[in-house]
Image: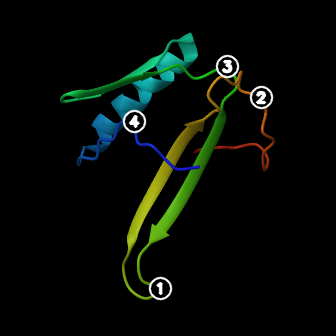
Amino acid sequence: MPEEVLFKSETPQSREAIASYLRSVADKLDAGDPVTLTAGEQSVTMDPPAQPTFEVKAEREGPAEGPGELSIEFEIEWDEGDGGADAGGSGELTIE
């Protein structure tokens, strides 16, 4: 299935600013509210179901030798029209 990007924002931010964005999303998820993303002229509102799939990845991209780019990625995924059925998993996640 082809991917359609509905919203994208990529800008350098301080660690504190990133934490603030993540807290805002966490508060919306906690309250069961939709999440609205806005940057400039683009905006999208998404309403995750009660049981979406939460994916966490730590990656290194680049050449096998030498420095590359490191990332921590958080994804909340669900099928359109899905109530968020449990997709299984690979054990309990902890983040310290």
Q: Nearer the viewer, mark 4 or mark 2?
A: 4
**Residue bearing the label numbered 2:** 85
Tag 1–tag 3 contact (CB < 8 Å): no
**Residue 13, percent across and down?**
24, 44
Q: CA distance from mark 1 to mark 3?
A: 40 Å
Rendered-image quadrant of the C terminus: top right
Toward which corner of the image does residue 5 lie, by quadrant?
A: top left
Residue at image x 23%, y 46%? Answer: 11
Tag 4–tag 2 contact (CB < 8 Å): no
Q: Is residue 33 left or right of residue 67?
A: right
Q: Earlier in the sequence, mark 1 or mark 3?
A: 3
Q: Earlier in the sequence, mark 1 or mark 4?
A: 4
Q: Residues within 10 Å of mark 1 (few under 14, many from 20)?
A: few
**Residue bearing the label numbered 3:** 50
Q: Amino acid at mark 4?
A: Leu
Local SS, label 4: loop
Q: Nearer the viewer, mark 1 or mark 4?
A: 4
> Viewer-proximal residue, 13 or 63?
63
Q: Amino acid at mark 1?
A: Ala
Toward which corner of the image does residue 85 lie, by quadrant?
A: top right
Q: Earlier in the sequence, mark 2 or mark 1?
A: 1
Q: Amino acid at mark 3?
A: Ala
**Residue bearing the label numbered 1:** 64
